[in-house]
Image (cartoon, helix red, strand yellow):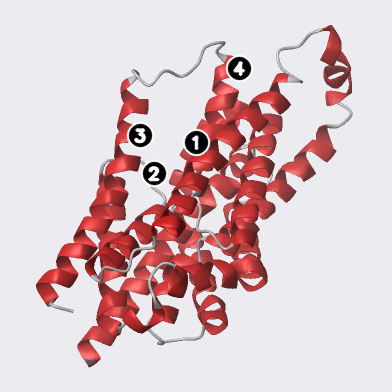
Amino acid sequence: MIVQYIILISAVIFFALNMGGSGIAPSFASVYGAGLISREKAAALFAVFVVLGALVLGSRVAKTLSSGLLPAHLFTLQVALIILGSAAISLFIANVLKVPQSTSWVTVFAVFGAALHFNSLNPAATLQMVSLWLVLPLIGFFLTFLFFRSIYPPRAANFWFYEKAHAWKKPIQYLAVVSSCYVAFAIGANNVANAVGPLAGAGLIQPGLGLLLISPLFGLGGWAIKERTMRTIGREIVPLGLVASTIVAFITASLLIFASALGFPQSLVQLNALAIMAVGTIKHEHVLAAREEAVRKMFAVWLVAPLLAGLLSFLALSLWRV
C-alpha cells in the first residue's frame, strides 16, 4: 500500500510538471519571443495566474472528474493510479511523436475506460462532453477567423487600424502580456483538475486542497522549460503577429474558461490549434487541408491517444481484477 501511495504521488507530480511545461508555451511564448518579457518573469506570472485560476474555477472541473463521470464509490487508490498512469502513458507517446496532446482528453478517456470496466458509463454525459470538445474548437476557429479577417489583409475598411498601429504599439504590447496571463488563468481553471480529480474521487484529498497543492507544480514545470525551447516556440508563434497571437489567446482562453464554468474538462491544445489555423487560412489565403501530412498526423494522434488511454485503463483494471 505504501508503495502504491509513493507511485501515485510521483505520477501526480510528474503529470503536473509536464502539464505546466507544456502550458507555458501557449501562454507566454509569443510575448517572450517578441522580447516583451524575460523567461523568469514569464514563469513567475504563469505560476501566479495558474494558481489563481485553479482556486477560482478549478473545483468545478475537479468535481466532474472525481464523481461526474465515474461514481465516487467506485474510485479507489488503485483506480486513481490506473487512470493517471494510463493518461500519462498516452501523453508520453504523443510527446514522442512530437504532437501536442490534450491532458484533458487523455484523462477523461482514461476515466471512460474505468467506467466501461465497471459498466457505469453515462452515455448522456459522455455525449455531452465529447460534443463540447468538438464544438468549442470550431467556435474558436470561426471567431478567430471573423476577428482577424476584420483587420487583415489591409484594405480601405480597416486602413484606420494600420494608421493607428504605431501609436498603439505600447498598448498592444501590454495587451499581449495581459492575454498571456489570461491564458495561464484559464489553464489553472481547467487543467489542474486533471491531476486533482482522480485523487479527490478516491477520497485521498479534498478538491480545494488538491488544487492549492498541485497548481504551484504547474509553475515549477513552466519554470523548468528550457530557454531554448521557449525561444524556438516563440519564434514559431510570433510570425502570426502580436495582434493575431493576442486575438488567439483571448478567444481560446475565454472558451476554456467557459468550459470550466460548466465543469467540463476542455483542451487548450485543440482550441489553440484551430484558432491558429484560422489565422493561417486568412494569411495564406487557403484552407489548411487535411491531406497535408502534418495536419493528418496531428488529427490522427488527437484521435488515437485518448482512445489508447481509455483502452489501457480498461485493460489494466480488468487484469488487476479491481
Contact between marks 2 and 1 (CB within 8 A): the answer is: yes
Name the mark on residue 282.
4
Label 2 SS: loop
Q: Which residue is mark 3?
A: 299
For discs 3 and 1, the disc positioned in front in the rendered view: 3
Please provide percent x and percent y for residue 7.
25, 79
Which mark sits nearer the N-terminus, 2 or 1? 2
- Residue at image position (82%, 32%) is 169
Give the residue type that dot 4 points to: Ile
Label 4 SS: helix
Label 3 SS: helix
Q: Callout 3 environment at 10 Å: few (<14), some (14 to 19), or many (20+)?
A: some
Please provide percent x and percent y for residue 176.
72, 42
Q: Which residue is mark 1?
A: 273
Residue 157 in which image quadrant: top right
Name the mark on residue 100.
2
Q: Residue furthest top?
A: 156
Q: Is residue 196 visible?
A: no
- Residue at image position (57%, 79%) is 212
Give the residue type that dot 2 points to: Pro
Rendered position, 298 above or below 61 = above
Contact between marks 4 and 2 (CB within 8 A): the answer is: no
- Residue at image position (65%, 53%) is 258
Please provide percent x and percent y for residue 236.
50, 32
The one of 216 and 42 positioned closer to us in this rendering: 216
For discs 4 and 3, the disc positioned in front in the rendered view: 3
Q: Callout 2 environment at 10 Å: few (<14), some (14 to 19), or many (20+)?
A: some
Give the spatial CA distance, label 4 vs label 2: 23 Å
Which mark sits nearer the N-terminus, 3 or 1? 1
Contact between marks 4 and 3 (CB within 8 A): the answer is: no
Give the spatial CA distance, label 4 vs label 3: 21 Å
